Image (spheres, helix red, strand yellow):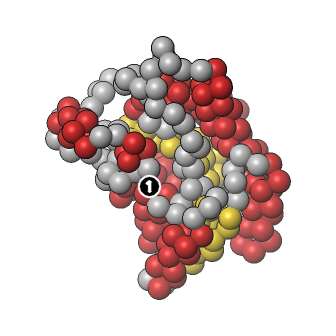
Amino acid sequence: MPVALITGASRGIGAATASVLAQEGYRVVVNHRASAPQAEDVAATIIAAGGEAMVIKADVTEPDDVAAMVNEINQRWGGVDVLVHNALTPFDITSFANLTWEQLGGKLDTELRAAFLTTKAVVPGMISRGNGRLIYLSTLLSRRPRDGMIALGTAKAALDQFVRYVALELAPHGITANLVAPTTVEGALSTGKVPAERLAAMAAAVPMKRLARPNEVAKTVAFLASDASGFTTGHYIPVSGGLGMD
């Protein structure tokens, strides 16, 4: 049974992804940093439905935490077949005029540090098995700027390019690396920072006239985790209801 590690899986897209992958037959690792009750609830729901799940607390920006988490998975379940890097590091909403280097550089550092550490930790096992799926949550903001979102959008743009380089290097080993880029998602932590009237305007701008739902993002992740996506790598896949068509 394949093993999927979902970072930041205690709520929102991460929790939905854990549930969907469990339904697809994956053993699921529910990672959290400081949301133990919610993470335990996600795992309990999966187990109650007949799936397999375990909870591991780890800060994905801390090398020792990441190493300990992957070591525990290796010992208990034999390795990580699918990494879904979903954990969102903090960021400030601000204009460029008010932006400090600490805000921008700090977000760039934590965004790439988390992706780098988790990828480095799981890739050796994937190479040894000749197969693996790396899936990273990006955002439309990495390509479509929006007022106030310069720190998040810039950091995610850096993540996008990091993933392309990873995809290029790991393709000969049977490992794919892809990005899932939702528009604003109902109930997301970042959504809570946006006034209700602004959210309504954002939904109205989407051709489908609503925000994305966590389960819709999770099902796109599930496709990229599956054998059906074996020849898809290095791609940025929007889940946007038609917003930002290329």
Nearer to us in this view, 86 or 51: 86
Vertical side of 225 occupied by 2: above or below: below
Q: Name the image quarter holding the N terminus.
A: bottom right
Residue 165, given in percent of the width and then of the height, sits at 65, 29
Instruction: Classify mark 1: residues with Cα within 10 Å, few (<14), some (14-19) or many (20+).
Output: many
User: What's the residue at 63%, 74% (across, down)?
Assistant: 54
Vertical side of 170 occupied by 12: above or below: below
Name the residue carrying label 1: 13
Residue 78, given in percent of the width and then of the height, sits at 75, 69
Nearer to us in this view, 52 or 54: 54
Residue 44, given in percent of the width and then of the height, sits at 51, 80
Residue 164, given in percent of the width and then of the height, sits at 60, 30
Would residue 215 be found to the left or right of residue 222 on screen?
left
Q: How many numbered callouts?
A: 1
Vertical side of 68 occupied by 107: above or below: above
User: What's the residue at 60%, 25% (across, down)?
Assistant: 104
Which image quarter: residue 183? top left
- Could you tell me if residue 211 is visible in this image? yes
Which image quarter: residue 23? bottom left
Which image quarter: residue 115? top right
Amino acid type, residue under disc 1 in the picture: Ile
Q: Determine whether the residue tagged by mark 1 lies in a helix, strand or loop.
A: helix
User: What's the residue at 37%, 24% (across, down)?
Assistant: 146
Q: Name the image quarter holding the C terminus.
A: top left
